[in-house]
Amino acid sequence: MNPDAVPRDDLPTLTALALRHHAEGRLAEAVTAYTDALRLDRRNPVLLYGFGLVLRDLGQNEGAATCFEAAFALDPGCVDAADSLGTLRAGQGRFAEAEACHRAALARGADRARFWNNLANALSWQGRAAVALAAWQRAVLLDPALPEGLSNLGGGLRDAERLDEAERAHSRALRLMPDEPQANNNFGHALQARLRHAEAAGWFRRALTLDPGYAAALCNLGLAVQRLGDGELAERLYGRALRVSPDLALAHFNRGLLRLERGELVEGWAGYGWRFASGQAGGARQPRIPAWRGEDLAGKRLLIWGEQGVGDTILFSSLCAEAIARARSVVIETDRRLVPLFARSFPAALVRDQRSDAGGVPDCDLHTPIGSLARVFRRDLSAFAGAAGGWLVPDPVLVALWRERVAALGPGLRVGIGWRSALMTESRRVAYSRLDQWGALFAVPGVVFVNLQYGACEAERCAAEARFGVAIHRWDDLDLTDDFDGTAALMTNLDLVIAPATAVGELAAALGVPVWRFGGRDWTQLGTAARPWFPAQRLFQPRGGEDIPDVLKRMAGQLIRRPI
């Protein structure tokens, strides 16, 4: 006699059989048992929830969602159904719905650590980092031994630049599940944020020993070895990650930047197109018009929208004139601070503050993010021929005003300076400087220094003036963060700008002002020794064992020798 043969009207036995089949992975038999049981009791929330779990494991997500919704509607105390529905919706990218489901589960199950962890995931995917971090902390407080909560908390702390705490959270997660590939990968990711690439690579390799097909670990290992100088191995690792997971956005993006660094522009720009999906460039807009992919623009109205930071927008604005020449009309939507400057520089386009996409874009037929212009207009280095900077046009009235103010500073070489980004992280600090490292430059005779550093920097400036006995001029009525027209007019009256990779140097170069840029190599050099966007820009980069202070000293020697 078949031990699984039971009367079809024996509900307790059918229920037990369905649970057993599911636990054993016999999903088809579990479906049959649940179907028979639900035929006897269609409004049983426990059965509906269990059947939903089986359908979820079979990949029948909408059927599973229907079961979860029905179970929770019939019994609001069936909070596991609401939580499971939230996890399912998150997996479909429907994060706001996921959040609502997890909150409904927490309304009656606020002591459930797993629910808080899942809510935090949904919040994180929506870019709400602070509330996600608080929810992960609540999960770990409720269950200090919840491995996935600890691992996720570590990731949230890493993103918040609380790196010591992140490392401790990942260490605790690893102690609880040392053979879990994700825990090993996440610990490596935390080390990578501290630029400990060799150590990080060891943890990524351990994760891959445990799971050779772990695409995220392959991608992370690729970035680690790339940072350690092995681009060929990095290329192979990104390729392996994409063979396992063809839609892994971060692998596409990282490989794209690697190829741009080598000057492989066609392939590089294709990978760069994954910047939004990979989370490396903020959120992409979704205008209700087709995306432009490089087709003929004759008779078409094109929307170009700004993205990432203003420095990137300024860099890629060098390509706007070519789009304007090809299209019937062009609308440029950008950061409000750039609108007057861009309107003056691109008079044939309509330039306006970036709008919401909710109402569509009735005056355009196609759209493109500004960074994607490069894949059409810069497919090889020869396309940069003739580039010389100076495409942005300052306000002539303001230029005249600032000419008088700068002249009042007295004789000497007028040098504008910036020294860091406003957003400083541990991984970014190596690319920037502290103002107290500028002693050699401040000692160069015959130089009038002008502050171009935006953000809160007054204390640094005053301390440097007192320490080095130098004046770093600035004007209280010029907001270097928000007034780009005023800043552009000031820059136009300077002889030289010295800055790292920030909007300060990009704006000056785009105005045609001589720029000395310090810091390491980056992908914008496109495999060359210069930056093709700004051929006249001089790059000062570490050599051998040099660090940034060494580079600043070398720049001082060059400044003494002049000419610029």
Image (cartoon, rainbow, N blue to C red):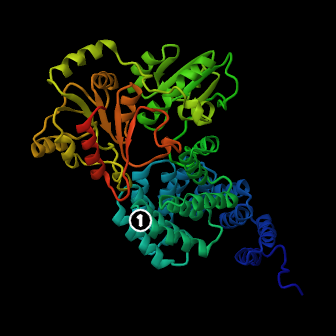
Is residue 256 visible in the rendered image? The answer is: yes
> Where's residue 526, x and y in %?
53, 42
> Where's residue 207, x and y in %?
56, 72
Is residue 141 visible in the rendered image? The answer is: no
Nearer to me, 437 or 96: 437
Please count the marks in the image: 1
Q: Is residue 10 left or right of residue 150?
A: right
For residue 485, above or below residue 68: above
Residue at x-position 56% and y-position 48%: 262
User: Which quadrant holds the N terminus?
Assistant: bottom right
> Where's residue 414, x and y in %?
23, 28
Which of the 4 quarters of the picture holds residue 195?
Answer: bottom left
Q: Secondary structure at mark 1?
A: loop
Residue at x-position 47% and y-position 72%: 146
Nearer to me, 188 or 563: 563
Q: Is residue 421 left or right of residue 528?
A: left
Label 1, residues with CA under 10 Å away: few <14, some 14-19, many ≥20? some
The three-letter code of the residue at mark 1 reads Arg
Nearer to me, 239 or 560: 560
Nearer to me, 560 or 325: 560
Residue at x-position 24% and y-position 42%: 556
> Where's residue 183, x and y in %?
51, 70
Q: Which residue is mark 1?
A: 196
Q: Is residue 252 left or right of residue 105?
A: right
